[in-house]
Amino acid sequence: MRSISFTLLGLALASLSVGAVAQTTSQSESTMSFNVGLTSDYRYRAISQSSFKPALQAGVDYAHKSGLYVGAWVSNVSWIKDYVGATDGSTEIDFYGGYKAEIAKDVSMEFGAITYQYPGNTADKVLANANTTEVYAALTVGLVTAKYSQSTSNFMANPNSNGSRYLELAATLNLGNGYSLTPHIGRQTIPNQADNVGDYTDYALALAKDFGNGLTASLAFVGTNANDAFYRVGTFDNLGKSGAVVGLKYTF
């Protein structure tokens, strides 16, 4: 489930790539980049998508000098089978596109849409189809980014959840020598759930190190107040439990 902050790894790495991307796009009409990554636990909005197991991920991004961009990203997932109880749905493929522009010194805006696809998933046999589409808008002022996302479909296999919302706030701190620190807080709401049991607040602190030549590593500490009644099933632990996530990403 890749949002603008994408995975926690992507959140930590974003600040390290902005300068390089800006420099490249100023010299050419467009850029295309590829990335591969490995994470110890694929977290999306602090909720584990891989049932606390490692995930292998890859993506491609195209950015035009005008500010328009499109991309695609893929990862293995486990939550559809483990938590929904569906028989199929082990792959996530995201397609996204949008526009980003600087509107004043140290102030930029961004908006776009993303669809999370789970090919062949059978979650609709249990709850609702897992495929989800969202629109989003973000505003960055200096080091701080605020972003709002809203689903235009059912949200992640939850019936009658069209209009689910996520509001997040993050800051990117350059520590020097290739290190960056990214604190983050977010609030997810899912409508039409009894007693708002699906709503939760998440928080994270991610440290990233750019080793140069496209290689970056990250360590993130993440947690939520996600309700056991909604995010824990059978012998599987609460998907939003606190934990550490280690990631490695190569961009070329």
Image (cartoon, rainbow, N blue to C red):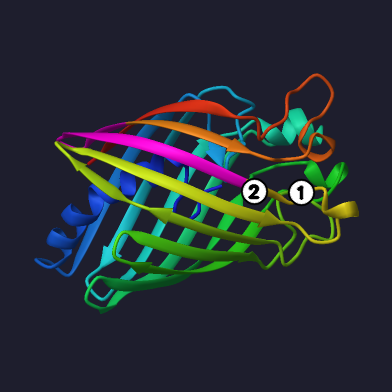
Residue 182 appears in the figure = yes
Q: Which residue corresponds to the image point at 30% horizontal and 35% vertical from the top-left?
A: 208
The 10 Å Cα crowd at callout 1, few under 14, some 14 to 19, many 20 or more, is many
- In the picture shown, does residue 68 fall above or below 248? below
Which residue is outermost to the top? 235
Residue in front for this viewpoint, 51 or 245: 245
Q: Which residue corresponds to the image point at 60% horizontal and 45% vertical from the top-left?
A: 202
Mark before the other along the chain sequence, 1 or 2: 1
Q: Do the residues labelled 1 and 2 touch (CB within 8 Å)?
A: no
Is residue 203 magenta-colored?
Answer: yes
* Image disc number at residue 201: 2
Name the amino acid, label 2: Thr
Residue in front for this viewpoint, 15 or 120: 15
Residue 4 appears in the figure = no
Residue 221 relative to residue 34: left or right: right
Query: Magenta segment range?
Result: 202-217
Q: Which residue corresponds to the image point at 44% horizontal and 35% vertical from the top-left?
A: 57
The residue where tag 1 is placed is 157
